[in-house]
Amino acid sequence: MSSAASIIGPTIGERNSMWMQMMTDTVRSCVYFLMGLGSLAMSFYAASLAISLTEITQHYSSSLSLRLTIAIVFILIGAVNFYTAYGLKFGTVDEVVGSLDSAIFRRSGKNVREGVRIQLVRILGTDDLSLTDDGRRFLFISGCRPWVRKLSTFHCQKL
């Protein structure tokens, strides 16, 4: 870093990278939970606008259905964020082995789930190229429950 850059400080990209690297699963869980709360607040705001609009004008218009649709979308976004927060907080496993059709989840040396099918997979943190496989989290759903594992210890093969 040059002397001028040291006075100004790190760039936005460097700050984001530092933030992502020091984030633990608990902090990520709290962030997703807060995003879920924000989505629910926005959905209630959109629904209250729709209801107050009909009370004032005494007739239904296309804006009512649009605002109610926006409220429903925000509720769904909030549900996904709460689901991800739950997985980060309570569904962390140490190792996943086997195949996507029959996987074994291990936590603290014990098998938590055996012979389960992994249905949906999403890698968190793919937009930050400075993260290693140890810093990225692998979110997957099995048995209607979210699970999270570090990408470096996910050893499942496709069949």
Image (cartoon, helix red, strand yellow):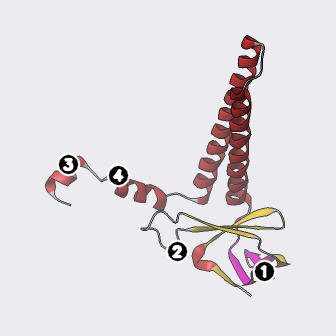
Amino acid under disc 4: Ile
Under tag 2, what secondary structure? loop
| Disc 3 packing (10 Å; few <14; some 14–19; many ≥20) | few
- Would you call the spot at circle 1 few (<14 residues within 10 Å), some (14-19), or many (20 or more)? many
Q: In the picture shown, does residue 26 fall above or below 51? A: below
Residue 105 drawn above or below residue 59: below
| Residue labelled with disc 3 | 7
Residue at figure coordinates x 80%, y 62% from the top left: 145
- For the stretch drawn in magenta, the main secondary structure is strand
Q: CA distance from mark 3 to mark 2?
A: 32 Å
What secondary structure is marked by label 1? strand
Of callouts 3 and 2, which one flags the residue occurring earlier in the amino acid sequence? Answer: 3
- Observer-nearest of 34 and 44: 44
Mark 2 — residue?
A: 133
Q: Is residue 7 left or right of residue 154?
A: left
Residue found 75% across the figure and 80% down from its top: 100
What amino acid does circle 2 point to? Answer: Asp
Quadrant where the N terminus sits is bottom left
Type of the residue with mark 3: Ile
